[in-house]
Amino acid sequence: MIVFPGFQALDVFGPLDALNVLAFTTKINLTVIADTLDPVSTNKVSWTNSSVGATFGETILPSHTYATAPPLDVLMIPGGLGTRAPGTGLDTTIAFIKARYPTVKYLISVCTGAGVVARAGVLDGKCATTNKLAWATTTPWGPKVKWVAEARWVQDGNIWTSSGVSAGIDVTIAWIAAVFGEAKAVSVANGMEYHRQTNSTDDPFSALYGLTNEKNSTNQAVDKC
């Protein structure tokens, strides 16, 4: 799991909790990767300061840096306001995704994390989705991506992208079903007491924000995905 300042909490901890439950019965290992080994916060960045002066957020402690990360089977990228870091703030993250994607078995993004993956060029020519509230500001980062508006998550080969925030749990459980079997996925969802979405195209939030496949998907995405 990659983390950067301003990551969305549930984008990280939702999928990780599903994997925590999976780890009760399946041998998997967690690597949390960031620029440095310093704690990474959801809110302590200048461009996300609360307009009402709230100081509410969480931190996570990385286990590795981009320079020391071990070989990986799965690379997960969250979204959040940190995806809009100004200047060169995400350059090392983007470079790491670009360099590591050819060596991983799977890549999973949550929310606006798809925009970061798109900036690495990994989604070029691929079908993908992202947060519907942030659709208009995220999809321009991937002009060569086949963006699918009406989707809770999208799988294209070994790349899985999901819609906003809580959709990260659904895509993770869907990935568990594909890789470890439906019985494992059911066990994880039941262990979390989570009502999982099993239909990747059932996305009420696209309708909420007025997005349709006909008007908002790109590069004939729906016909090809």
Image: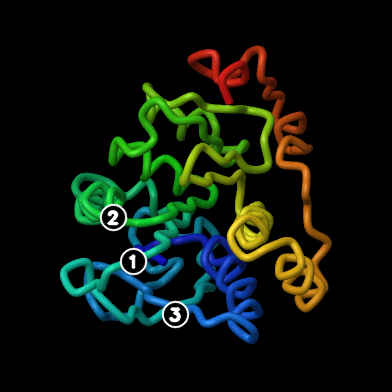
Residue 158 relative to residue 225: left or right: left
Q: SS at mark 3?
A: loop
Quadrant where the C terminus is found in the figure: top right
Residue located 44% across and 54% down the image: 106
Q: Along the polypeptide, which appears first: circle 2 or circle 3?
A: 3
Way the structure is coloured: rainbow
Percent coordinates x, y for residue 33 in the rendering? 32, 70
Quadrant where the N terminus is found in the figure: bottom left
Relative to 172, is 163 above or below? above
The residue carrying pointer 2 sits among few (fewer than 14), some (14 to 19) or many (20 or more) residues within 10 Å by Cα, namely few
Could you tell me the amino acid type at mark 3?
A: Asn
Q: SS at mark 2?
A: helix
Q: SS at mark 1?
A: loop
Label 3 close to label 1 by CB (< 8 Å): no
Instruction: Report the disc number at residue 29.
Output: 3
Q: Which residue, given by chain and number where applicable, does mark 1 sit on?
A: 72
Q: Which residue, given by chain and number where applicable, does mark 2 sit on?
A: 103
Could you tell me the amino acid type at mark 1?
A: Leu
Task: Say which of 188 and 12 sits in front.
Answer: 188
The residue carrying pointer 1 sits among few (fewer than 14), some (14 to 19) or many (20 or more) residues within 10 Å by Cα, namely some
Could you tell me the amino acid type at mark 2?
A: Thr
The residue carrying pointer 3 sits among few (fewer than 14), some (14 to 19) or many (20 or more) residues within 10 Å by Cα, namely few
Label 1 close to label 2 by CB (< 8 Å): yes
Residue 107 relative to residue 99: left or right: right
Quarter of the image for residue 221 reads top right
